[in-house]
């Protein structure tokens, strides 16, 4: 026999309030349904938004975030789920920075449960936009604008890092950067956006042709260790390999790219546990 969930009165009261607060979203959906305007078109290359689709996209994204927030807060009120925090983090930070940073951010407060989703920057951004996570942890550079709408999201610095051009200690590529076999990030990578932006205009860099591409810094590091070329790699990811002498500088420090590690969240109010964590987290 299927089990039925009967919500506590406190949950019903909370949902009633949330339903009133989401009245505008409901009215917007009703108007949209009545207009029968196509929101996307299908082509051989895939689906693309129409002008109507682009117009309502921010509202649709906000509605999705609101629904995820309703679910999470209802679970907290009912005691169905622990006071949990949901993060999306890029792969390199998930393995190196996140564990120690989370422990230091607790500051004596109890975090009952944490869910970490590790993926490319592009996927992590979409998870935050659609409300599937509360926070995004990623590398940022002050000269490279974020793709997240500044009127919907805020962020703060929680750490520092640096991209260093590294290669295997057993390889010798010469002194000209233009002659280097280049291990590149793909467009899904946030680090790739930063590298491309920061090195644009450097004449030697313009001649670099990617020998191998990946959105994973760890994969590029493995290729560099196999003497396949030079890659701009986070210091936080490569400290042990550099200390052991397996990776060395391929170019001087003028080619380094300083980074900030940012924690980003929606401007909309999060659950109580998430808001408390945001207040404690920082640099």
Image (tube, helix red, strand yellow):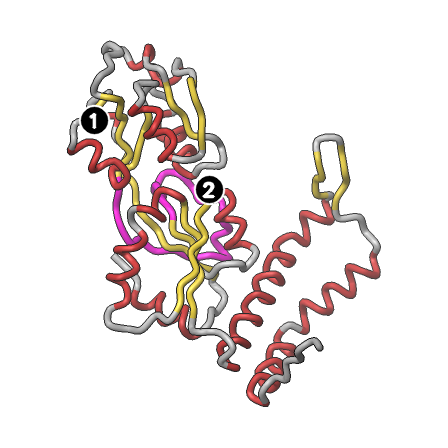
Is 144 magenta? The answer is yes
Name the residue located 24 percent from the left edge and 61 percent from the top edge: 104
Name the residue located 80 percent from the left edge and 60 percent from the top edge: 33
Q: Position of residue 196 (x, y in %)?
A: 40, 28
Q: Quadrant of residue 145?
A: top left
Count of numbered tags: 2
Circle 1 or circle 2, nearest the eye: 1
- Report the disc number at residue 120: 2
Q: Position of residue 226 (x, y in %)?
A: 31, 21
Q: Which residue is mark 1?
A: 246
Q: Quadrant of the C terminus?
A: bottom left
Give the vertical position of 182 relative to 24 (above or below).
above
Is 27 magenta? The answer is no
Element marked by disc 2 = loop
Q: Earlier in the sequence, mark 1 or mark 2?
A: 2
Give the vertical position of 163 relative to 139 (above or below).
above
Please name whichever residue, 186 or 82, is drawn nearer the observer in this view of the structure.
82
Q: Quadrant of residue 230?
A: top left
Q: Position of residue 41 (x, y in %)?
A: 77, 40
Q: Is residue 126 left or right of residue 282?
A: right
Neighbours of disc 1 within 10 Å: few (<14), some (14-19), many (20+): some
Q: Which residues are magenta?
A: 138-161
Name the residue located 49 percent from the left edge and 48 percent from the top edge: 125
Please name whichever residue, 41 or 99, is drawn nearer the observer in this view of the structure.
99
Name the residue located 29 percent from the left edge and 46 percent from the top edge: 96
Q: Is residue 28 left or right of residue 126?
A: right
């Amino acid at each position: 026999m299927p089990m039925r969930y009967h919500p506590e009165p406190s949950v019903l009261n909370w949902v009633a309030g949330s339903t009133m607060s989401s009245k505008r979203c409901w009215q917007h959906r009703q108007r949209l349904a009545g207009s029968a305007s196509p929101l996307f078109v299908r082509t051989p290359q895939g689906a693309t938004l129409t002008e109507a689709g682009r117009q309502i996209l921010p509202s649709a994204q906000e509605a999705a975030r609101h629904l995820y927030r309703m679910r999470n807060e209802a679970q907290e009120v009912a005691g169905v789920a622990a006071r949990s925090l949901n993060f999306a983090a890029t792969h390199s930070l998930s393995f190196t920075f996140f564990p120690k940073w989370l422990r230091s951010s607790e500051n004596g407060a109890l975090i009952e449960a944490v869910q970490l989703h590790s993926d490319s920057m592009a996927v992590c951004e979409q998870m935050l936009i659609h409300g599937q996570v509360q926070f995004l942890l990623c590398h940022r550079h002050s000269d490279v604008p974020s793709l997240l709408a500044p009127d919907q999201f805020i962020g703060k610095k929680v750490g520092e890092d640096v991209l260093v051009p590294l290669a295997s200690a057993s390889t010798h590529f010469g002194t000209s950067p233009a002659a280097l076999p280049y291990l590149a990030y793909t467009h899904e990578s946030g680090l790739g956006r930063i590298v491309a932006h920061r090195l644009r205009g450097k004449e030697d860099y313009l001649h670099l042709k990617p020998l191998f591409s990946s959105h994973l810094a760890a994969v590029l590091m493995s290729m560099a260790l196999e003497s396949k070329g030079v890659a701009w790699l986070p210091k936080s990811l490569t400290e042990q390999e550099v200390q052991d002498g397996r990776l060395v500088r391929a170019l001087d420090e003028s080619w380094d790219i300083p980074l900030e590690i940012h924690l980003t969240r929606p401007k909309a109010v999060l659950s109580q546990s998430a808001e408390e964590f945001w207040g404690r987290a920082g640099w």
